[in-house]
Amino acid sequence: MFQLRIHGRGGQGAVSAAEIISVAAFYQGKHSMAFPSFGSERAGAPVVAFVRIDDREIELREPVMDPDFLIIQDPTLFRGVDVFAGLKPDGWVLINSRKSAEELGVGEAVAGLPEGHVVSLPASELAMKHIKAPKPNIVLMGGFAAMTGLLNQDAMEKAIMEKFPGRLGEANVMAARAAYDAIVTPA
Amino acid sequence: MLKQLDGSVAVGDAVALCRPEVISCYPITPQTHILEHLGELVKSGELPGCEYLNLDSEFSAMSCCIGASAAGARTYTATASQGLLYMMEAVYNAAGLGLPIVMTLGNRAIGAPINIWNDHSDALAAGNSGWLQLFVENNQEAVDVHIQAFRIAEALSQPVMVCMDGFVLTHAYSRVDMPEQEQVDRFLPTFEPRQVLDPAAPISIGAMVGPEAFTEVQYLAHIKQLDALKLIPQVAREFQDIFGRDSGGLIKTHGPEDAETIVVCKGSIIGTMKEVMAGMREDGISISAVTIRSSRPFPKDALREALKNAKRVLVFDKSLAVGFGSMLASNVRWTMTGLETPINAIIGGLGGRPITRKSLRRVFEQGIRSELEETHFLDLQHDIIARELDRERKQRRSGPMAENIVRSLGAARAASTG
């Protein structure tokens, strides 16, 4: 079972991202469960969302406590939230930032992870470029797909268009593609 | 048809397949998305022939359900927590009048202190209202049991509450096999009311009944619910015939029926418990679980049969009867009259506290070693309790308890994260 934990702030779309990732996994024939953390959802407050993906039915309901993958939508969360709690020794980290983990002061926390498992991606900037709003969630989803190979582009784009029909969806698809390409073939 | 949906949308779609004629709406977290989704289906024309009423309170919502159901309409609403309390007078009336309304309860804690998260306090508060209460374990069951609920309610002419864990189910996306309209139409016949307000044949509903017959009216309500103990498994079998899957009857056993330790619980917690128990059984521990689908009527005989050979019973309850302990454990004890089996109550998951595999395994092992108190509180933070009791001892005007605890928790957290 693959477990993802998304850390963000209210308004950044952590819960929507979890939902869309679960729908994309479903389109690939996987079992998947997405659910939000049971905390107050308000703009700016720390928010956590979870996704589990497996080949069999998922019945576990506890929050993801030992994630394979962490998406950090806002690096200011490193102050005050123990985002790395329980991360597996061979886990993955995707940070919404231009700065590296070391530059963000969390080099030590990710030091033991395999090479290539810690990626910084300026997702809010890419979102501003493609969807004209600082919503990093779908960009980071593209990054997640590229890093893990768990979601194919067709399933991901179908799930995005289902959530955001029309032009907003198309813009988000472009944003996710840009992130995917940036990671698969770095400049 | 397989779909990936959140619990609320799945339930909304299932209710729509039942062709309700009146839906009363008043929003409250965590059920709001169900009624919102149904509102969209009515407005878009996907749910034709349905009157969708936006009301000014839960009390109005249930009152409209009563009127609509008495006029012969298939009627639905949803609520939770304080919303259920606010409509409570009408909730009792719906049952007393024998009106087959179906209502989703998105189970949520009751304040004060205010808390929007999941536990079973609200269901407990309405546990003696005369409504049937059916608890579901996952979103597939939520879909299937809502369809069965209309059938059961209308057969008995009694209202049915489908209890689904707030957030844990209502807000979780998972795979659901959505039934076809043709299947639901085959399973659920057109509503034939037992009583109907019809201008062409006027009657009144809601007589005053004095001491000379009140007992008899109540007794009839009671035996109707007891009849449901036969009806519910029968409806479940017919459901399986048409839809091709077993969605459970009165109770459900998870794991070996002859286990030494059996845990009794309700709702979605069984998902995590099954994982824990599979691990324990691999380690040679004899343990299984029984979930209660029908909380009212209480399946006394079926439960006794399932528990009669157990060496120990642990009752996991997501609600607390303050001043008593676990009402569920009390109900279980009653079913086991004459048996010497030790029973412990475990109160857990109050106000949405996550229930982890680690904590469950620990508490089950403690139970097996006879180390649990009669009523055990899972993951209770004794330091917080001690601090607050100390404060109360030291000063008469110790202030509001909830605020004190939240403040001292905040201070402790700030100190630990620097």
Image (cartoon, coloured by chain):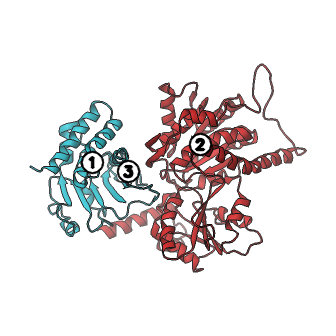
Chain colours: A cyan, B red
Label 1 is placed on what type of residue?
A: Met
Label 2 is placed on what type of residue?
A: His
Q: Identify the residue shown where x is 66% and y is 38%.
A: B101
In space, the residues marked 1 and 2 are separated at their CA atoms by 34 Å
Dot 2: what SS? helix
Label 3 is placed on what type of residue?
A: Lys
Determine the chain carrying the residue at label 1. Answer: A
Pick out the residue farthest to the left: A187
Pick out the residue farthest to the right: B212
**Residue B8 at what x, y percent from top left?**
49, 43
Q: Is residue A79 visible?
A: yes
Which of the two labelled residues, at mark 3 and mark 1, occupies the earlier sequence position?
Answer: 3
Tell if the residue under mark 3 belongs to the same chain as the one under mark 2: no
Q: Nearer the viewer, mark 3 or mark 2?
A: 3
Residue bearing mark 1: A141
Residue bearing mark 2: B146
Dot 1: what SS? helix
Q: Judge by depth and name the residue closer to the eye, A53 or B1.
A: B1
In space, the residues marked 3 and 1 are separated at their CA atoms by 17 Å
In space, the residues marked 3 and 2 are separated at their CA atoms by 26 Å
**Residue B153 at what x, y percent from top left?**
69, 41
Q: Nearer the viewer, mark 3 or mark 1?
A: 3
Do tag 3 and tag 2 residues touch (Cβ < 8 Å)? no
Answer few, some or many: residues within 10 Å of disc 2's Cα (few below 14, many 20 plus, some between 14 and 19): many
**Quadrant containing the C terminus of chain B in the rendered view:** bottom left
Determine the chain carrying the residue at label 3. Answer: A
Determine the chain carrying the residue at label 2. Answer: B
Dot 3: what SS? loop
Residue bearing mark 3: A30
Q: Identify the residue shown where x is 17% and y is 49%.
A: A122
